[in-house]
Image (cartoon, helix red, strand yellow):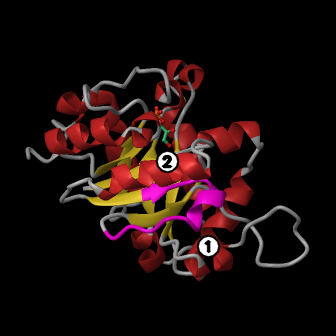
Amino acid sequence: MIIALNNKSNLDRNEFLTYQEGLRKLEANSTLIVCPTYLNVNLVNLTNIHHGAQNVSCTNNGAFTGEISAKDLKAAGVEYCIIGHSERREYQRESLTEVHEKLLRLLENDITPILCIGETKAQRENNEVERVLKEELETAIEGLTDEQKNRLIVAYEPIWSIGTGIIPTIEEIEEVFRFIKTILPNTTILYGGSANEKNIDILKTSPLIEGYLLGGLSLKPVELQTFINKLENR
Ligand code: 13P
């Protein structure tokens, strides 16, 4: 199992340093990945958790004010990077082409992309789930070799579930996971959206879910350990 922690735009320097001491105590058989803010990326100093980031520039180093390149992330020790999160697609108007470029920059720099995809509530109600996910996936992976596709991690995050406390049914999740596998048969797929220490008992009944991308829960190491214990039957 993979458990990726998306801190989003949370934890200032001192808060992160305290939080990191909580993370240091986590015990898990799963692969844990912490994705802090850019400013906290260089503070990561953990042996039990892999090093991630939340975003990357579409471009290599150059005259791109405010951007952080994949090369710079690599030099900072980053091994995994989230791209295409629905919050960036919505608030930063990140396009399908930009997500594709980001994915390429990560692969060029030997960083594993965690590609987020997901539909809105309206799209689900209009039976557009497969259309939306197919478009987000196929544009992102265009031109990739099979070997590159197998290096990806996909995170299915229904937008209506993120931060709402509502999770899809296991049937809804499995339907989507099976669909993603028709496009990317060998790619690891995570579930994200309000996953927590309470609903993990339900989520873990699905053999298709290969890990989780956690937002709110990522900030709470004690509850996170409960989540891990339940997931791993510890
Ligand atoms: P929540 O776990 O807070 O719903 O966030 C999920 C998410 O967006 C992780 O990337």
> From the image, which quarter does the N terminus lie in?
bottom left
Residue 11 percent location from the top left of the image: 57, 44
**Which residue is drawn at the image coordinates 20% and 56% (left, top)?**
28
Please indicate, yes or no, whether residue 81 appears anywhere in the rendered image. no
Nearest the viewer among 200 and 141 is: 200
Instruction: Give the percent coordinates (x, y) of residue 100.
Output: 66, 62
Q: What residue does disc 2 label?
A: 6
Judged from this view, the residue extending furthest toward the right is 63
Left or right placement of residue 93 versus residue 80 in this view: right
**Residue type, mark 1 in image:** Leu
Between 190 and 137, the residue placed more toward the observer is 190
The quarter holding residue 120 reads top right
Q: Amino acid at mark 2?
A: Asn
Task: Tell me if residue 23 can be seen.
Answer: yes
Front position in the image: 223 or 142? 223
Estimate how packed mark 2 is, as few (under 14), some (14 to 19) or many (20 or more) residues with alpha carbons within 10 Å. many
Image quadrant in which you'd find residue 33: bottom left
Q: Which residue is mark 1?
A: 73
Kindly state the secondary structure of the residue where label 2 is placed: strand
Asked if residue 141 lies left or right of residue 180, the reply is: right
Residue positioned most to the left:
234
Residue at the spot 54% in from the left edge and 65% down from the top edge: 43
The 10 Å Cα crowd at callout 1, few under 14, some 14 to 19, many 20 or more, is many
Query: x%, y% of residue 83?
Result: 59, 56
User: Element under label 1?
Assistant: helix
Q: Earlier in the sequence, mark 2 or mark 1?
A: 2
Magenta span of residues: 34-47
CB at disc 2 and ligand 1 closer than 8 Å: yes
Q: Position of residue 2 (x, y in %)?
A: 31, 56
